[in-house]
Image (cartoon, coloured by chain):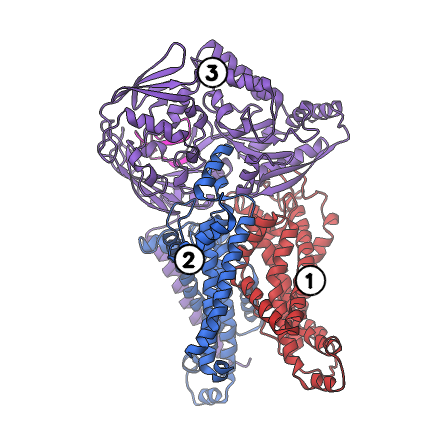
Chain colours: A purple, B red, C blue
Amino acid sequence: MSVSPAFADTLTRRRLVQGIGAGAALLGLAGCRSAVDQDKAAPAGAQAGPRRGGTLKVATLADLTPALLFTQGPIFSIHRLVFNTLTRYAPGGLDPQPELATAWQIAPDGKAITLTLREDVTFHNGRPFTAEDVVFAVRNLQNPQRSAQLRATALAVTGFDIDSPHRITLRLAHPVTNIFDLFEFMVISAKESVEDAVLGRNVVGTGPFVWKTWTPGTSLVLERNPRYWVPERPYLDAVEIRVVPQPDALIASLRSGQSHLAAGLGGRDIAPLREDKAFNLREYDQGSGNIYLGVNTSVAPLDDKRVRQALSFAVNRDRIVKQALGGYGLASAAPWPKTSPVYTDADANRYPYDPTRAKALLAEAGHGGGLDLPLAFLSTAPAVAQMVQFDLAQVGVKTTLEPLDPAKFQAQLIAQTMPALWTGTHGFASNQPATLAVSAYPFNEAKNTSKFTDPQYTEIVQRAWNQTDARSAAAKAAYAELSQALLDRQFIIDLAVLTNVQPATANLRDVRQNRYNATVLDDAYLAG
Amino acid sequence: MTAAVVTKAPVVAAPAKRARNPYVQGLLTPRGITGLIVVGLVVLLGLAAPLLTSYAPTFQTSNALLQPSGEHPLGTDEIGRDLWSRVLFGIRTDLIVVVSAVPLGALAGCLLALVSVASRWADVLVQRLFDVVLAFPGLILGLTVTAVLGAGTSTVIVVIAVVEAPAFGRMLRGAILSHREREYALAARVGGAGPARLLVRHILPNAADPLVVQIAVSLSIAVIVEGAMSFIGIGVRPPEPSLGSIVSGSVMHLQDHPIYAIGPLVAISAFVLGLNLLAEALNKGVRR
Amino acid sequence: MTGYLLRRLPSALLVLVLASFAIFAILRLIPGDPATTLAGSDPSPDTIAAIRADLGLDRPFLAQYFSWIGDLLSGDPGRSYLIGGQITDLIGDRFGNTLALAIGALVLMLVLGPILGVLCATARGRVPRALLGAVNSVSLTVPVFVTGVLLVLLFAVTWRLLPPGGHQSIVADPVIGLQYLVLPALCLALPGSAVIARYIKDGVLQALGEDYVRTARSLGVSRRRILWRHALPNALPPVLTVLGMQVGALLGGAVVVEALFAWPGLGQLAEQGVARRDYPVVQALLLLLVGVYVLVQLLTDIAYALLDPRVRLG
C-alpha cells in the first residue's frame, strides 16, 4: 500500500468537498418542498364558517378490500362517503334521525316497520332511488358472501310490502330491538353495480362523494357528488385516500401536510402527536371495539365459572389501558362503551384488579396449587397477551403463549379450535346491546368459540333481541339482564373498550363518524 | 436478509506440511484478534446474563418506557420490562438459535453433497433442490415455512438450516470433485484405497478449510436471519427476548422513545461484525 | 445450437412444473384459508362456508390445481381474492415500485462505492484508514433492518430531514417522491457499495503499484490524472461483474426494506399475500420468481454453450 502521502491528501480533501457539495444539493432539494415538515406559510387567522372547496387527503394503514365492502372492518370505511343509510343515530346516543328514510312507523306488535323514503334522491349513475333499492339492500346483507355482521338482524326481515315507490313496509319474524342498528349499518347501493363493486371496479351509491379511481394498495380517489340530495353539500371537492401501511410513516405524512386525517392508528401510535398543537386528536364516543381474553369452557378446569372469574380478577386492566393502548381506552369488565344504554360504572368495575381474591377463588375451586394453560394470541398484537400472561402468572396460572398469524387465528376462532385461552378483539358493543349478542360471533348463544352453551343465556339473549321498543323499560331490563349474564359467566373476559381516536390537522373541521366508525364528511371542510 | 458473503472462495491448496495451524495464524492478525474480542465479549454477556442483571427478562412493572437509569441501564420497554436484561437474554436466545441451526444446516448440506457425489442422478436432484431454495429470497422462505410450522424458536432454527444448507453442500461438493482428480487421491486409489476410505482419510480433511470459513460466515448470516424473522414478527415466541424481536418492538417507538432501539442495535451489529472479522481472518489464514 | 436448446428445455420445464405443484400444495398446507381472512371481523361459520364455496375452495385439490394451471396457460393468472385487482396489474404496479427502489439503490451504490473505494485506497495515516475500513465493514455486514432503523433514527427522528417511511410516485411528484426514496434506497445500497468499494480499492492499489504508474509519476504526470486515467479505469472491469451479482441481492434485501419503510413493492405484496392467504397472488409471485431463476440459468447455460462447443455436443 505504497501511496505517496501528498497524493492521498489532496485527493481526500477534494473528494470531501465534492461529497459535501452533493449533500448540500440533497438538502437543497429537501428545502424546496419537504416530505417531512408542513408548509408553515398557511395563514393563521382562519375566517369563520365553512369554506367550500379543497381536497381532503386521508392516510390509512390498510387499503379497502372490495369483497368486504358491506362488512364493518377495522379500516377506513367509505360507507358514509359513497353511500347513505336509511337512518342515522344522533351523536352521543341511539336516537334515530332521518336520512334516506324521512319517517317510520313500527307496528303495535313489533312485527313490521313502515318507512317513508325521500323522493329527491338519485344514485351516482342518475337512476332515482326507490323502495326497490331498500329491498335489495336487505337481501344483499342476507347473502352470507357479503360477510355482513348484522346478517342475523337482516334475516329477521321476512318480507316486503311496497305501497308506493317511496313507501315500504318490512315484515319481521319477531320484534327486533336493534332494527335501527341495521339501518345505521345497511348502505343503500345501486343493485346494478354491486357485482362490480365487490370487485373494486366501480361503487355506486347516493352519497356525498362519487367513486372515481382506485389503485389497489395505493390510493382511492372520490369526487364531490354535484347532485347530492343535501343542498350545498358536501363542501369538499374531493377525498383522496392513500394507503401508508406503517404507523410512523402515517404520522409523518400528517406532519408533512401530505394528509389531513390519519385512519387506523392505535392509541399507542398516536403518543408522539399528543403534545402537538398543530393536530386535533378527535375522540369519538362509540369506541372502536374491545380487547378481551377468551376462554374455552370445554377445557377443564375452565368449565368452572369460579376459575374464569378468578382470571378476570387477576388481570390488571388499568395497566393494559395505560401500556398497551397508550391510555386511549376504558378499563372495563363489561363490553359497553360509556354511551351505550346499558353502561354502568358498577359493571365496568365488576372485576377490579385483585390478585388475592383471584387466588382465593382458585383455591376454592380446588386449584390453589396453580394451573398450566396455553394462551393463543394474534402474532401482530403481542403486547396484551404478554401482559395477561404476566398477570396470570402472579396468581399461579402459568400460560404458554402460542402466536397465530391473522388467518390462522381467524380459522381457529371459527372452527372452535382455540386452546384454553386466547386474547383477541371484538366489536359491536357500541349500539343496541342485542346487536352484540346476535352479531359478534364470540357472543353467539347457539355456537361460539368458547363452546359455551347455557339455555338461560340463550333465553336472555332472545328476550333482549325481541323487544318492540328499544327504549321501553322492559327492553332496558332485558339489556341489564344480558350484561349481568355476560359478567357472571365470563366465557368472554372483556378487558378494555378501545377509544376511537383520530388525529387530524387543526384546519380540518366537522368530521363525524357514524356508530359503526364510518367517517362522515357531509359537513366537513378545510378552514382557510 | 442480505447474504453478506464476500469472502472470496478460498483457494484450496494442495496438502503441504505447515509450520503452524493456518487457523491460528489467521486469528493472530489484528483483524482476527479484534473479531475474537468482540465475539468473545458478546458471547460472554449472553452466557453471564443471569449474573449481570437482577431483573428477569420477562418481569413487568408498571413503569413503561423509562429512560436509562442506575436501576435500568437501558431503560424499560413498552410493557415495563428491563431492557438491559432483555438484551442480555436476547443474546442468549440468539446464541442458542445460531449454535444449533448452523451445524444442522452444515450437516444437512454436507450429507446432501455426499449423496450427490455418489450418483449422477442424485446429483441432478440435489442441485435442483439447492436451486429451488436459492431461487426464493430467504425471508419469503421463512414466511412460508413459518406459516406451515407455526412461529417459534424451532421454526427459526429450521429456516436458518434450510437457508444455510446449499452453501455448505455446494462447497463440499466442489471440494470433493476437485480433490478427486488430484494426484494424491489418484495415488491413493492406485494404492488400493476404497472410495469410503479415500473420502474419509484423504478428501474430507482437505476439504475442511473452506468449511471452517463457511461456518464463521454462516454464523453471522444466522444472526441476521433470526433478526430479520423476529423483526417481521415470525421469529422467537414472546415473551422470550431475541435481539431481532427487541428491535422489532423498538420500531414502534422510534419517535417517542428512540433510546429503546440502541441496545439491541449495538448488540446485533457487534455480533455480526465480530463474526465477519473472524471469517475474514480465517479465510486469510487458510489462503496463506 | 437449436438442438442443444431443445435438449435443455425439458429440464427447465420440469423445474417449472414441479415448482408450480409444490407452491400450490404448500400454500394449502398452511392452516387458515382466504375465506377466513375475507370474512372480516367477528364472522359466523355460515359466512366462511359461503365464501369458500364462492371461491371454489371446496373443490377437490387436483381440480383446483388444474384449473389454476389451465388459467395460467390461457394467460390469466386470475384476480387477487383480497385486493380485488387483476394480478397482472397488481404485480406490474408493485414491480414498478420495487424497480424504482432497486434503481435508486443501484445509483447510490455506483456513487458511494467508488468514492469509498478511492478514499480507502488513497487514505493516509492509520486512523483515517482504520476509520474508513470500519465504515466499509459496517456497511457490508450489518443487516439491512439494523442500518434501516439507524438511518430512520438519524434522518427522520433526530434531524427530521426525510420521512421515516411511505411512498410517493416519482413520476407523479419527483421532488417529494425522491425524498421518500432516499432512505430505503440508501439502506439497500450500503452492502453493495461496500463490496464495490473493496474491489475499487484493490484495483486502484494494484494499479498504483504498477511500474508504468511509477514511471509516469517520476515524469511529472499529475496525481489526479494518474488516478483518473490509469488507476480507476483499471479497477472497473471486476466491478461490473460484482454489480451483476448485487442486482440479485438487491431484490432479496427489498423484502425487509419494504417492510421497514412501508414501501409498496413486490416484497410487501408477497408478505401480505402469505399473511392473508391470498393464494392467487402468492402463487403467481412465487412461480414468477422460479421462472426468472430458471430463465437466468438457461441463459447462462446457453452463453456457456456459445462459448464452448464441447458443452453443445457433450
| Mark 3: amino acid | Asn
- Tell me the element at label 1: helix
Whether residue C259 is situated above or below residue A354 in the rendered picture: below
- Tell me the chain of label 2: C
Quadrant where the image shows the N terminus of chain C: bottom left
Q: Which residue is mark 3?
A: A466
**Residue C101 is one of the magenta-drawn residues:** no
Asked whether the viewer can see residue C159, the reply is: no
Asked which quadrant contains residue A113, the reply is top left
Q: Nearer the viewer, mark 2 or mark 3?
A: 3
Q: Nearer the viewer, residue A282 or C215?
A: A282
Q: Which residues are magenta?
A: A503-528
Q: Which residue is mark 1?
A: B103
- Tell me the chain of label 1: B
Q: CA distance from mark 1 to mark 2?
A: 35 Å
| Mark 2: amino acid | Thr
Q: Tell me: B187 left or right of C137.
A: right
Asked which quadrant contains residue B158, the reply is bottom right
Disc marking residue C98? 2
| Mark 1: amino acid | Pro
